[in-house]
């Protein structure tokens, strides 16, 4: 049977995806009183963005570049990539999030990232951290979500003769 509350919940679920500029619904009578014809018209909106940023602070200048897409291939997949550069640090990250993996209602996400910090001239050390994470999320009960994640990273520390004894020991 037709339920106005469930129809409104479905419309709100569409709105929450943030990939449509406008959503219109109309409900018409069907062939019998037990049937309804539901028409939902959607208008897609641009879902990609590019951003560039620059700044200057106590640690020096920084430059960042990001590319995001919220509806990759028209399937609601979210892609994000970023790179941030400063005199002593370089960070790169790629995120892929599929909020409805294989039409299961479960999300599947992965993150790949790498950071390299070089303070050899000032403090005698250089670090690098590279790794990835995979995760999933689903609604276990109404409004209760379960989201396990697995993260693994490799971190490396290199020192030179001007590093402190603790950093050399940590290496």
Image: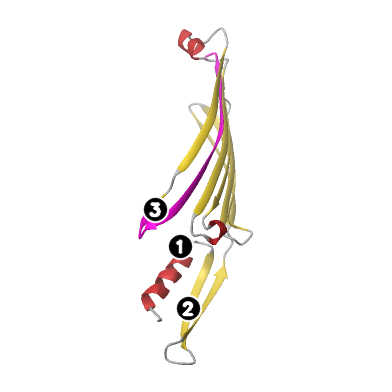
Q: Which of marks 3 and 1 is nearer the N terminus?
A: 1
In the picture as drawn, the residue positioned furthest to the bottom comes out as: 32
- For marks 3 and 1, give the one nearer the viewer: 3
Please name the residue that numbered disc 3 is placed on: 145
Give the SS element for disc 1: helix
Give the Cα distance between marks 1 and 2. Answer: 16 Å
Q: In this view, does 18 lie above or below 97?
A: below
Q: Splitting the image into 4 quarters, where does residue 5 fall?
A: bottom left
Please name the residue that numbered disc 2 is placed on: 25
Q: Earlier in the sequence, mark 1 or mark 2?
A: 1
Q: Position of residue 169 (x, y in %)?
A: 49, 10
Q: Where is residue 19 in the image (x, y as percent from the top left)?
A: 54, 63
Q: Is residue 153 above or below residue 169?
A: below
Give the Cα distance between marks 3 and 1. Answer: 16 Å
Q: Splitting the image into 4 quarters, where does residue 140 fall?
A: bottom left
Give the magenta part as a residue range: 123-145
Marks counted in the figure total 3
* Nearest the eye: 151 or 15: 151
Q: Residues within 10 Å of mark 2 (few under 14, many from 20)?
A: few
Q: Splitting the image into 4 quarters, where does residue 148 fall?
A: top left
Q: Which colour scheme is used?
A: secondary structure
Give the SS element for disc 2: strand
* Residue at screen point 49% across, 39% down: 150
Please name the residue that numbered disc 1 is placed on: 16
Q: Does the magenta stretch include residue 13?
A: no
* Residue at screen point 57% across, 65% down: 45
Give the SS element for disc 3: strand
């Amino acid at each position: 049977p037709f339920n106005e509350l469930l129809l409104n919940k479905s419309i709100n679920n569409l709105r929450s995806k943030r990939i449509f500029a406008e959503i219109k619904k109309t409900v018409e009578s069907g062939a019998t009183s037990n049937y309804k014809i539901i028409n939902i018209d959607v208008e897609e909106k641009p879902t990609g963005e590019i951003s560039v940023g620059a700044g200057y602070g106590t640690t020096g200048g920084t430059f960042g570049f990001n590319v995001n897409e919220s509806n990759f291939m028209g399937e609601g997949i979210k892609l994000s990539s970023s790179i941030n550069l400063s005199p002593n640090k370089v960070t790169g990250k790629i995120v892929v999030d599929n909020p409805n993996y294989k039409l299961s209602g479960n999300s599947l996400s992965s993150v790949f990232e790498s950071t390299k910090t070089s303070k050899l001239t000032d403090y005698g050390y250089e670090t690098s951290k590279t790794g990835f994470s995979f995760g999933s999320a689903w609604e276990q009960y109404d409004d209760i979500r379960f989201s396990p994640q697995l993260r693994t990273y490799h971190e490396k520390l290199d020192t030179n003769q001007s590093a402190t004894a603790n950093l050399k020991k940590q290496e």
